[in-house]
Amino acid sequence: MSESAGYIVAVRGDIVEVEFKVEKPTRHELLTLSQDKEVKLEVYSSTVYNTVLCISLSDSAKLYRGAKVERVGKSLEVPIGEQLLGRVVNLFGDPIDNLGGLSEIKKSSIYHSSPAYSELSSTANIMETGIKVVDFFTPVKKGGKIGLFGGSGVGKTVLLSELMHNIAIFHKGLSVFAGIGERIREGHELYETLKAAKVLPNVALVFGQMNEAAAVRFRVGFTAVAIAEYFRDVLKKDVLFFIDNIYRFVQAGNELSTLLNTIPSEDGYQATLSGEVGAFQERLVSVKEGSITSIQAIYMPADDITDAGVQAIVPYFDSVVALSRTVYQEGRHPAVDILASSSSLIDPNILGFEHYEAVIESDKLLKRYTYLQRIVSIVGESELSLEDRIMYYRAKKLLNYMSQNLFVTAEQSGLVGKYVPIKKTISDVRDLLAGRLDNVTEEKFLNIGDLSELKV
């Protein structure tokens, strides 16, 4: 055995311990088996002995104690470029869509440092999505981050897919989608939806789904980021970056830390959680010549937003959209809990005075509605004063108005999707708040586009 080679001394699931007699490889360096170059190990950490701990990026069934390991001398590199648009690839950038291989492959490491502070762009332009509740209460900042928070089955993937559909069709931008630890069925449905809508040629999809090993789910997001960075930095494009689901990245890191026998931190998560999330999120930023606008779905365990894994992600977002099981059960879709959602963009200098004033008035109305709802549940509507009754019904109309038929669910629901410009949404809400629609019953506001569709 050559001096630079090592050999495996232990295999614990996705964690492989490799001994090197002379010089240890550096963190993130790629290793491979001498007898099988398809096997890829990535150096994760070092020990006090002559060994390094690696995560296995390929099938660990091929590994055994005493197997000879060679250093590749670099980190994992994946294909980048416009040839990835319209394609579905895995962690290594290999196509998995049965459409043949990639030609003229240009490769880049999946690890890059985040841009310097002096290179960052701080403009605050709003990106219209056509989804009323998002555009009005939690607007998307071009080059910013928006998080879709919710438990299982409340519509995170549907809302993310709708945002992807609307922005790709109506804004014609380049998109990168990272499927981290979600269902294969959802990934296939998304692919077919984009294909049917004829926007697939503008989208690069990277999948590391639920059936993959924890090491693959932990690193596949970095492959997607490397592709997005190429579009931003080399092609000088504005990129849309979608993630479903960023919590699975946290979860995969937690699984690996358990196998490493590291001492857990809060809620049983790995002590390195904040650093791992930061290394990922700090690369999804905008520079002066290009931007990455990130829209991320976040699963909340047991619908608990105070979970330490969720809280590690929250600080990176400009806007937070909270999806609620209660709203979902009431039949309002998207099932957004408006009062639990927030945005740092609610500022008259960013939104304009008209939009800002309408949002503030709407928040006041919905907070009053929450209070009145408790009274109604105990003594009934008849006990409300006339003024309170008007406010109560006006708030119901506003909540119903914020429901909307979506393009991506049209095939299942049979209802045509609606795209509502943000100016129209603001105008409609102002009419509603001014009492111009007090004579219309609240049921008629459910699942309409703008008020021109209202059947009085």
Image (cartoon, rainbow, N blue to C red):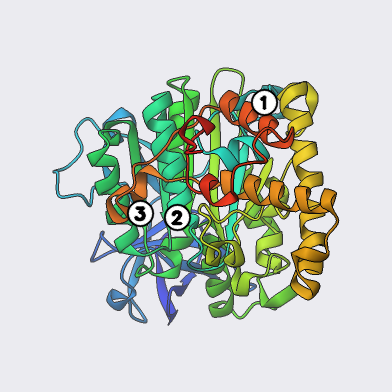
Mark 1: which amino acid?
Leu
Mark 2: which amino acid?
Thr
The foreground one among 159 and 113 is 159
The foreground one among 290 and 113 is 290
Q: Which residue is mark 1?
A: 120
* Residue 337 sits above or below residue 200 on the image: below
Q: Secondary structure at mark 1?
A: loop
Q: Secondary structure at mark 3?
A: strand
Categorize mark 2 by other alpha carbons within 10 Å: few (<14), some (14-19), many (20+): many
Q: Secondary structure at mark 2?
A: helix
Categorize mark 1 by other alpha carbons within 10 Å: few (<14), some (14-19), many (20+): some
Which is more N-terminal, label 1 or label 2? 1
Give the x, y percent position of residue 81: 34, 30
> With 296 as the anchor, is 173 left or right in this view?
left
User: The N terminus lies in which quarter of the figure?
Assistant: bottom left
Mark 3: which amino acid?
Phe
Which is more N-terminal, label 3 or label 1? 1
- Contact flag, marks 1 and 3 (Cβ < 8 Å): no
> With 201 as the anchor, is 272 left or right in this view?
right
For the residues labelled 2 and 3, the Cα–Cα distance comes to: 14 Å
Q: Residue at x 77, y 48 (%)?
A: 391
The foreground one among 312 and 400 is 400
Q: Which residue is mark 3?
A: 207
> With 45 as the anchor, is 90 left or right in this view?
left
Residue 181: which quarter of the image? bottom left
* Residue 342 sits above or below residue 370 on the image: above
Q: Which residue is mark 2?
A: 157
Give the x, y percent position of residue 168: 39, 32
Nearest-to-viewer mark from 2 and 3:
2
Give the x, y percent position of residue 64: 33, 80
